[in-house]
Image: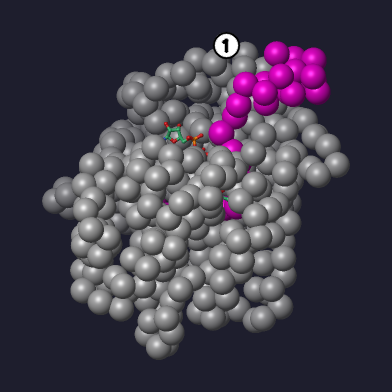
Amino acid sequence: MVNRPVRIAHLGLGAFFRAHQAWYTAHAPDADSWGIAAFTGRSPAMADALNAQGRRYTLIARRAEGDHAEIIPVVTEAHPGGDDEAWHATMSAPELAVVTLTVTEAGYEPTSAIPGRLLAGLRARRAAGGGPLALVSCDNLPENGNALRIAVQGAAGDDADLREWIDAHISFVSTVVDRITPATTPEDRAVAQALTGWADRCPVVTEPFSEWLLAGEFPSGRPQWDVAGARFIDDVEVYERRKLWLLNGAHSLLAYAGATRGHATVAEAMHDEVCAAWVEQWWDAAARHLELDGTEVSDYRAALTARFTNPRIQHQLAQIGMDGSRKLPVRAFPVLRAELAAGREAVGPARLLAGWIRHLRGDTFEVRDPSAGEFTEAARGPLDQAVRSVLGGLDEELAADDRVVRLVADLTTELSP
Ligand SMILES: NC(=O)c1ccc[n+]([C@@H]2O[C@H](COP(=O)([O-])OP(=O)(O)OC[C@H]3O[C@@H](n4cnc5c(N)ncnc54)[C@H](O)[C@@H]3O)[C@@H](O)[C@H]2O)c1
Ligand SMILES: O=P(O)(O)OC[C@@H](O)[C@@H](O)[C@H](O)[C@H](O)CO
């Protein structure tokens, strides 16, 4: 067995990290020199389960023609997020070069534990005389590197010395990450065992497609992720919008509006021609505001249609529909504003909001959101008033626009059972 030195720390030991960043690391030609110490959000469950099986796990790429299983061996340590001692030791180690994160959109907010935890790790590194690091956000946020810089610098507050040390030693890398990875189910465990003969307690099922675009410096080096297929570019912004609007926006539209038609998964909703037409309408609106050439957008749309309709990927709408108050301002509002500014009616993006209103009014699956109480309360009562209050919780200007409120309310009525 290879004894990999820990040179990467990861925060957010979930399904996506194991299907994406760990996979690229395992496929880099210098993988033997890059072990990962991975930390959960808080619960010890995934760390315990992985530790009980030597931190190896099965990654199943679910192709249309069948499953392909491989064992991923690059997680060398797994810890509960609350293990401060392990965290500080990992962050202080001289050979550490990279920190990656998958902690959801909410993880970047000042109220989240993540910025403070990162800062405590950086403080420990500075005290130990540690060298520079690259912090690599792998969450679905615009300008995710900059969002992480703001969160970490914000947590440093008025500690000017630490802020200065961070500016001098820490690079915040922006990324676009893409690989549809649903939560693991008990059936996935049975499939993994049938494929490998090993009773893995924590396999991950993912789609064959994968993309990783990165922009930023790695002052202490990095694995040869580029040889494994990652692309290092100067600026990810245009690709970030393409992904957040076309993929994630369509996902959220299907999650809420699709669920009003009784669907439970992305593939089920995409096989409903009414939902598929809504997605096309959303894509037409979003595509008008992407600075990419026509074929690039149409090829991406065609590929997305194939990915979304893959019936073998059971991506639950309820999983995608979590945390809507954090996702919609990123996925729907920019397109809505751009369509309105261009003098268009904006039906595509407005339907996404209408679906969310139905969801908040209790017509789909359980509302799971850091602001669930505030938004379910706002969504009560007469529809026009509900739409105005929900929008008002996120964007005063949109809430004050009578055309938007009327349109969203009409579309909400249209989505009624
Ligand atoms: N699953 C995908 O298809 C996919 C694709 C691209 C990007 N992502 C990004 O990865 C994130 C995680 O997805 P996943 O599928 O691994 O989910 P997951 O539920 O399997 O794992 C999430 C991990 O992050 C931790 N976490 C969650 N919220 C947190 C918070 N507020 N603060 C600190 N830690 C927190 C959890 O404890 C867990 O360890 C997504 O939110 C998204 O930003 C996911
Ligand atoms: O991961 P979230 O919760 O930010 O969003 C749910 C999905 O839209 C998302 O996970 C996509 O599957 C993913 O971004 C594909 O790369």
* Mark 1 CB near ligand 1 (8 Å cut): no
Say left or right for 409 vs 13. Answer: left
Residue bearing mark 1: 52
Judging from the image, the colouring scheme is one colour
The residue shown at (29%, 70%) is 405
Say left or right for 282 vs 226. Answer: left
- The amino acid type found where label 1 is placed reads Ala
Give how far across and how far down residue 308 sits, in percent.
66, 53
Magenta span includes 100: no
Give how far across and how far down residue 247 sits, in percent.
57, 59
Taking the view exactly as shown, the residue that stands out farthest to the top is 52
Q: Quadrant of the N terminus?
A: top right
The residue shown at (74%, 24%) is 191
Tell me: residue 248, above or below residue 221: below
Magenta span includes 177: yes
The residue shown at (58%, 24%) is 76
Taking the view exactly as shown, the residue that stands out farthest to the bottom is 343
Would you say residue 273 is visible in this rendering?
A: yes
Say left or right for 148 vs 178. Answer: left
Would you say residue 31 is visible in this rendering?
A: no
Tell me: residue 255, above or below residue 287: above
The residue shown at (60%, 26%) is 185
Give how far across and how far down residue 45 sits, in percent.
46, 18
Residue 415 appears in which quarter of the rendering? bottom left
How packed mark 1 is, by other alpha carbons closer than 10 Å (few <14, some 14-19, many 20 or more), is few
Taking the view exactly as shown, the residue that stands out farthest to the left is 158
Of the pair 242 and 226, the residue shown nearer to us: 242
Tell me: residue 218, above or below residue 21: below
Q: The magenta stretch spans which residues?
A: 170-199
Of the pair 321 and 272, the residue shown nearer to us: 272
Of the pair 64 and 230, the residue shown nearer to us: 64
